[in-house]
Image (tube, rainbow, N blue to C red):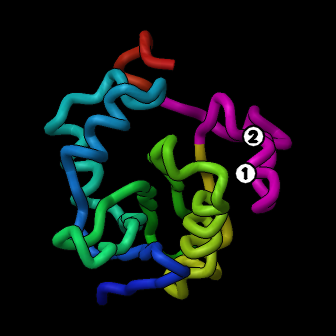
């Protein structure tokens, strides 16, 4: 899949795996409620095998380049379904609409835009995702989950 890039003001979203600041993403995800159970090796595999979207603050001419300030990844078959995961914007950059821009970009990304089913998990961002058409399962009896570690929420 080719690398794509989107720009808005002083910010950039890129689908380039090589551009990711893996340590920054790991530090955020491993502290988040949804990632505390992950090992670094499991995290790295999850990123390696996903469509990635890094959010960056463009260099200001004084620094040597862009600084990663957000991230999201999608697991997909490119035909019927996608799982949106690990979405975040660093706290110092929140309140600028960057999270919405990140999810807007993902949802409009041509290889993903016509998928029939999108899934995600959240404990605290239901209203944010409702604005994209996400809802709770209407018939949860149709969906099942298998977990190897039942202590993980």
Asked whether residue 58 appears in the rendered view, the answer is yes
Depth check: 73 or 148 in front?
A: 73
Place residue 4 in its image quadrant.
Answer: bottom left
Q: Position of residue 96 (x, y in %)?
A: 64, 59
SS state under label 2: helix
Q: Residue 106: which numbered mark, if any? A: none
> Which quadrant would residue 24 be assigned to in this image?
top left
* Most common SS among magenta residues: loop
Q: Is 144 part of what is drawn in magenta?
A: yes
Q: Is residue 74 above or below residue 60?
A: above
SS of the residue at dot 1?
A: helix
In the image: residue 60, left or right of residue 114: left
**Label total for image:** 2
In the drawing, does residue 27 fall left or right of residue 54?
A: left
Q: Residue at x 28, y 35 (%)?
A: 27
Q: Magenta segment range?
A: 121-146
Q: Residue at x 54, y 81 (%)?
A: 8
Q: Quadrant of the N terminus?
A: bottom left
Q: Mark 1, residues whose alpha carbon is within 10 Å: few (<14), some, or many (≥20)?
A: some
Q: Circle 2 sits on which residue?
A: 126
- Relative to 124, residue 45 above or below: below
Instruction: Locate residue 140 relative to residue 20 in the image: left or right.
Output: right
Please tell me in which quadrant of the rendered image residue 58 appears: bottom left
Which residue is drawn at the image coordinates 26% and 40% (left, top)?
Answer: 26
Residue at 80% over, 44% down = 127
Mark 1 vs 2: CB contact within 8 A: yes
Residue occupied by mark 1: 129
Answer whether residue 88 is visible to the viewer in this image.
Answer: no
Q: How far is mark 1 from mark 2, CA to CA? A: 5 Å
């Amino acid at each position: 899949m080719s690398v794509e890039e989107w720009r808005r003001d002083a910010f950039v979203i890129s689908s380039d795996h090589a551009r990711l600041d893996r340590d920054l993403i790991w530090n955020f995800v491993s502290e988040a409620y949804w990632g505390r159970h992950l090992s670094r090796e499991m995290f790295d595999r999850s990123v390696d095998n996903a469509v990635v979207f890094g959010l960056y603050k463009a260099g200001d001419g004084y620094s040597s380049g862009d600084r990663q300030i957000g991230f999201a990844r999608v697991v997909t078959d490119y035909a019927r379904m996608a799982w949106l995961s690990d979405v975040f914007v660093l706290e110092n950059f929140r309140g600028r609409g960057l999270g919405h821009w990140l999810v807007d970009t993902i949802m409009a990304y041509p290889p993903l835009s016509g998928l029939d089913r999108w899934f995600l998990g959240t404990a605290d961002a239901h209203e944010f995702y409702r604005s994209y058409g996400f809802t709770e399962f209407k018939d949860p009896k149709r969906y099942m989950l298998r977990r190897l570690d039942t202590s993980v929420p």
